[in-house]
Amino acid sequence: MSESTNRKQALLKRHRRNKRIGLLVSLLVLVGVGMLVAWWLPLVLAVLAWVAHEAWFADHLFYSPKDDYQYQFPADTEQPKVVLDKARIVLGQPLELSGDETLILAVRIKSSVLGRFIDPYIPLPNGDRQVFERGVNGLRYLNLTGHGQALVDGQLQLQGRFCQLHGAPVLSVFRQPDVRQQRVMVIAPHADDAELAAFGLYSQAAQPWIVTLTAGEIEAEHYQQMGLGKPEAARLKGRLRAWDSIAVPRWAGVPPEHSVQLGYFCLQLAAMKAEPERAVASREAELSDIRVFRQFNTFPLPADTDGQPTWNNLLADLRAVLLKARPEVIVLPHPVLDPHPDHVCAQQAVLEALQGLEWQPTTLLGYANHLHDNDRWPMGDSGNGISLPPSFDSTYTLRPYCLPLSEERQCDKAMSLGMMHDLQPRMPFKRRVRRVIQRLLAGRRVSPWGENEFFRKAVRRHELFWFIKHK
């Protein structure tokens, strides 16, 4: 298990322990109230406590909102002087912008009393708003990408809602190449990862490729409810997601011959990597042959010969696809920010496959569809901008690459997610009730694009990546 996965599991364990302790203490208090006052009062208090928990304390936030984010940008980062003058950002020197730059503003944000119950946010031009943790009181990073003209014109207002801005802001300007004009390959550990992270990028790329590593066949309860047994449901889910990985990119103009499904088994990549020659079967589908999920590929791959789910076969498949596509830009899970075990292994597999290969990309861009510390990030609603995620390791240098998305492209991205079978089932009843409570008491909106949480998280005016390699 990777260090990032261990950290995520440790955070979850601590969170669940604290919840159990809090529940026990609450139970003892309620019993005491019932004995001293009235038998029915604990029942009323219990219901009110549950509603309060669902409204304000149900988020998985594994750090204090008072903690400063700790980013280390490259030493040569351009940082023109700016000041915050009566809620307006004023440049201390002329700044020339072409419009393609990633603009990040570090500023201290402190929530008001209401900001402990309603998500605090900073409104930006054109209906953008960037949302932060309730009770925030620390250094945060606003994403001003797309607002460069207002900044240069001195018209950029930063008036917090349920929060105030303090201290001296620091502006970082990242001038970046337009990778959309190059051959782009998106590595997706599962069907829908490419769309969640990079639909806007690959839908505009000159020559896009999508390579999906696993069939994503496990956790098929939705199909078991149709009367299928567990193995049959897993196989059906895997076949559907394999189809999605080939068919949905066509919505963005990616030809079928540029979409590849490798068909390895979900959450088994780490076991494969630990013993590269051992075939690791599916956890739930009762399958040990990956060819079941490769039927929609348009060209043969090395592992088609024996269908064995081994790490060595995965590397051979990746090398074959890399040599065929010769991508200049590879977009893949970030090794530090995204802790999902399949995402970590997907990134490691690509880097290992590239070792000694005759073709090498010029750029590697990382993305994070999952986080260690905050399961709600990106915070806020569909259509909002994406501020930088929580990061507390200042020893790791990060350079962001942000791509703005038009409203039309956001709509197309939402439709691509709607075609993904894994995002179509209804959410559990408890989560639906929680959403109603949060809408009424905490002012949170439900995404108009779909019920699944990823519609809120992914359909935004920004797609955020991180340079891992750039020549």
Image: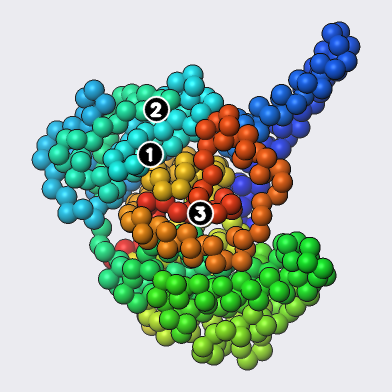
Q: Residue 205, how many percent across, how many down?
A: 33, 71
Q: CA distance from mark 2 to mark 3?
A: 25 Å
| Cα–Cα span, label 1 and label 2 | 10 Å
Place of residue 278 in the rendered image (x, y in percent of width and height, measured from the top left) = 70, 77
In this rendering, is residue 318 above or below 219?
A: below
Distance CA(mark 3)–CA(mark 1): 18 Å
Are circles 1 and 2 on residues that touch, CB within 8 Å?
yes
Give whichever of discs 2 and 3 has the lower sequence position: 2
Q: Viewed as shown, does residue 13 lie left or right of 93?
A: right
Residue to which mark 2 is pinned: 161
Q: Report helix, strand or loop for mark 1.
A: strand
The residue that mark 3 highlights is 449
Callout in the foreground (2, 3): 3
Image: 75 above or below 46: below
Q: Is residue 260 above or below residue 376?
A: below
Q: Quadrant of residue 167?
A: top left
In the image, what residue occupies the spot 61% across and 85% down? 295
Q: Nearer the viewer, residue 327 or 116?
A: 116
Q: Relative to 308, is 464 on the left or the right?
A: left
Disc 3 secondary structure class: loop
